[in-house]
Amino acid sequence: MTVLDSIYADEIGTRNVNPRLDTDLTCDIAIIGGGLTGISTALTLAERGYDVALFEAQELGTGGSGRNGGHVCQGWPNDFHHISRQLSSSDADLAWNAGMGAVDLLKRNVAKYKIDCDLRFGYLHAALHKGQMRDLDIMQNEWEARGYNHFTRLDSPASLAKHIGSNAYVGALHDSGCGHIQPLKYLLGLAIAAQVAGVRIFENTPITSIVTKPKKSLTTDDGKTILPNIIVLCGNAYLGDLAPSPMRHRLAHVTSSILATKPLSDNMIKALLPTGVAVADCNAALNYYRIDANGRMIFGGRASYTNVQIGNLEHDLRRRMEAVFPMLSGVDLDRIWSGKIGITVNRIPHFGRTNDDVYFVQGFSGHGVALTGQAGHIIADAISGNGAVFDVMTQLRHLPFPGGILRTPALALGMAWYKLRDRLKL
């Protein structure tokens, strides 16, 4: 069993874990996966009158939803032209509005369900060299042409110094529409709302088989049977062997690691990130970080496609952090943890539905905190008979990753190439 070892779990402390399924069950909709995607889908469907049961193999948030960096980001993970060039103008507008509505949905959820999750706005997309700044200029022009008005270009040491105490960057885009959050608090707040709406949540209930013909059924690890009308797969990088072939070959797992320092002094915080922004650089193997509500630096990076962590995590993460903030050299650490990110070849989430009414979405590629909620709404809309956005997203082409024994070496080689590009400032 995997233990949720992030700093977020410590903040939650002991919670009343939902019971394991101990009898056979029927429902309208069965959702597999107790992270942000699954809970958001379940909540939306239950509020529309569906009888929903959700099954989590371990405890809620044990996967990526309780391990991520807590960055709340607008839009889709890749530049929007990668989406729009595959679609008609009207379909591209639907996709754009869906992506840009994700953060607004998160804000509405926090307010509607009164979730205390340390939500704060302000974000820097940080450029390490002029080439990355040119890419940010292209992004700003593209987004502003579609009506997004939350960017401020920071292109001088003085403008950067208002937000960040580092000499690592040549410029940045300040984004007042993005921010950061305590993700596990947010997830558990949504889970409570889902239960109030009628969702039955079962934790420590692994689903070991899915049968779709002649009728749909799920089987748990101890032989209990669930009979749903519709199945939704929301396990993302943690779904494992339950993923059907169209999903499995179009998702790769990246391990990312995060450290949390001990709480820093107010003076140190003001010297590091005086306006409280979250930051991500523009490298392929990026660093991402923020100061949390307890004054700790939450610093992530060190992407790896291999299943084994190589080298000393603490040494590598410290080296990355201290390269950005030398003043944090030798600072005491509270925790280091790792987790899997599900990515697609084009870094765009992969939506789909099999011929047997099994819906799925996967591959948020590091943008999942806000987009998972929107994905839940998109799938719920499709199930409810309004599949316009879902149908648009399923039009997008998702190439498979290499398979067999070449899969991990090929992915690692690809990441090595991108890391070399980062170092050469290409």
Image (spheres, rainbow, N blue to C red):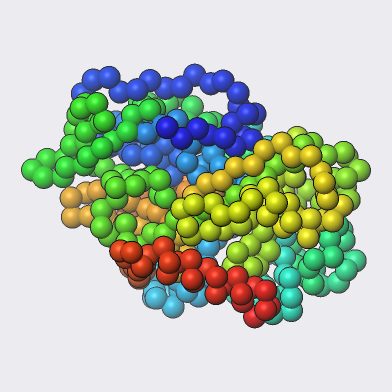
x and y percentages locating residue 149 in the rendered image: 68, 64
The image shows residue 128, relative to residue 334, as above or below, that is: below
x and y percentages locating residue 69 in the rendered image: 62, 47
Is residue 104 visible in this depiction of the protein?
no
User: To which quarter of the image does residue 168 belong?
Assistant: bottom right
x and y percentages locating residue 402 in the rendered image: 35, 68
Left or right: 207 as drawn, with respect to 160: left
Q: Residue at x 48, y 71 (%)?
A: 413
Left or right: 28 as drawn, with respect to 165: left
Q: Residue at x 87, y 38 (%)?
A: 265
Extreme front residue here?
311
User: Which of 87/241 is in front?
Assistant: 241
User: Which of 295/45 is in front?
Assistant: 295
Q: Residue at x 47, y 57 (%)?
A: 306
x and y percentages locating residue 355 in the rendered image: 18, 55
Extreme left residue here?
214
Q: Quadrant of the C terminus?
A: bottom right
User: Which of 174/69 is in front?
Assistant: 69
Image mark count:
0
The image shows residue 399, relative to residue 323, as above or below, that is: below
Is residue 2 visible in this depiction of the protein?
yes
Q: Quadrant of the N terminus?
A: top left
User: To which quarter of the image does residue 45 belong?
Assistant: top left
User: Which of 379/241 is in front?
Assistant: 241
Q: Residue at x 64, y 73 (%)?
A: 422
